[in-house]
Image (cartoon, grey):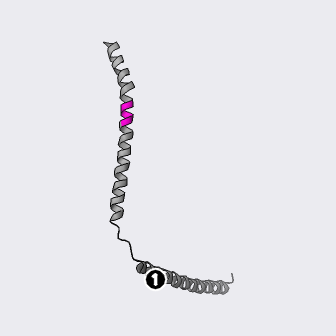
Amino acid sequence: MATQSIKAKNEESQGGSGDAIRKNISGKIQGTRDFLHDVNVEAQKVTWPSKEDVISTTGVVIATVGFFAVFLRVVDWIVEKGVTQLFKAFGV
């Protein structure tokens, strides 16, 4: 009885593991195919902006960055002068 169960386990492990590995690999391949199909379906739903929209929003971004660069430089200069005056007042 014990010998038969060991033989059965050996046969299952030899043949069964190969089948399990094949099923696992084929399952992963199918999962990858399903994923790529879903990506393709979702990519087709994307509404891309027109060239004019991209150009106008890029202009707005560049203007905003320029404005804040100048604004922060002015604020930095004012704070620098204030701290310098504060140090002079206290003799540091």
Three-letter residue code for mark 1: Val
Can you tell which quarter of the image residue 69 is in?
bottom right
Density class for disc 1 (Cα within 10 Å; few <14, some 14-19, many ≥20) is few
In the rendered image, which quarter is residue 88 located in? bottom right
Q: At 41% from the left edge and 79% from the top edge, which residue is drawn? A: 53
**In the rendered picture of this protein, how many numbered marks are placed on residues?**
1
Q: Position of residue 38 (x, y in %)?
A: 33, 56
In the image, taking residue 76 as reference, residue 10 lies left or right, namely: left
| Residue 75 percent location from the top left of the image | 55, 85
Image position, residue 1 (x, y; %): 30, 12
Query: Image check: 10 left or right of 72?
Result: left
> Is 9 placed above or below 64 here?
above
In the displayed structure, would residue 60 be above or below residue 44?
Answer: below
Q: Residue at x 38, y 45 (%)?
A: 29
Residue at 38% of width from left, 49% of height from top?
A: 32
Front one among 32 and 82: 32
Residue on which the image places disc 1: 60
Q: Classify mark 1: helix, strand or loop.
A: helix
90 is higher (above) or lower (below) than 35? below
Q: Quadrant of the C terminus?
A: bottom right
User: Residues in magenta?
Assistant: 18-22
**Prevailing SS of the magenta stretch:** helix
Q: Nearer the viewer, residue 3 or 91?
A: 3
Q: Is residue 76 magenta?
A: no
Kindly give the residue lying farthest to the right in the view shown: 91
Q: Position of residue 60 (x, y in %)?
A: 46, 82
